[in-house]
Amino acid sequence: MRTAVLAKVQNMPLSGHLLPELGLGLPAAIPTAHRLGSADMMETILQTPLETRDGAAVTRETAGFGPQ
């Protein structure tokens, strides 16, 4: 979150990369967030992989990450 504060002060966009399934809520807390990177690295071990629709991540209705 310190990085998010520095990015906000400098009016710089901040992106999350790798494992978006675990940090999907983080961009909601970052004022200058603009992109959520995805590498499809977790799909083989998650019961419910990250769903995207129209270029946007879709949050789950259930709690947790769903590791198998």
Image: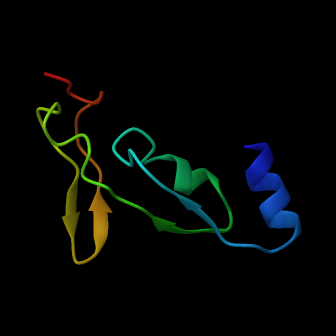
Q: In percent of the image, x 39 and y 49: which residue is there?
A: 20
Q: Position of residue 38 (x, y in %)?
A: 34, 58
Identify which residue, 37 or 55, lies in the foreground.
37
| Quadrant (top left, top right, bottom left, bottom right) of the N terminus | top right
Residue closest to the far top: 68
Determine the image quadrant of residue 39: bottom left
Q: Position of residue 12 (x, y in %)?
A: 75, 73
| Quadrant (top left, top right, bottom left, bottom right) of the C terminus | top left
Give the vertical position of 56 relative to 46 (above or below). below
Determine the image quadrant of residue 44: top left
Q: Position of residue 27 (x, y in %)?
A: 54, 56
Q: Position of residue 18 (x, y in %)?
A: 42, 49
Give the vertical position of 39 relative to 66 (above or below). below
Q: In percent of the image, x 61 and y 51: which residue is there?
A: 29
Residue closest to the far right: 9
Q: In percent of the image, x 41 and y 62: which residue is there?
A: 37
Q: Is residue 1 left or right of residue 5?
A: left
Identify which residue, 39 or 49, lies in the foreground.
39
Q: Is residue 30 left or right of residue 43?
A: right
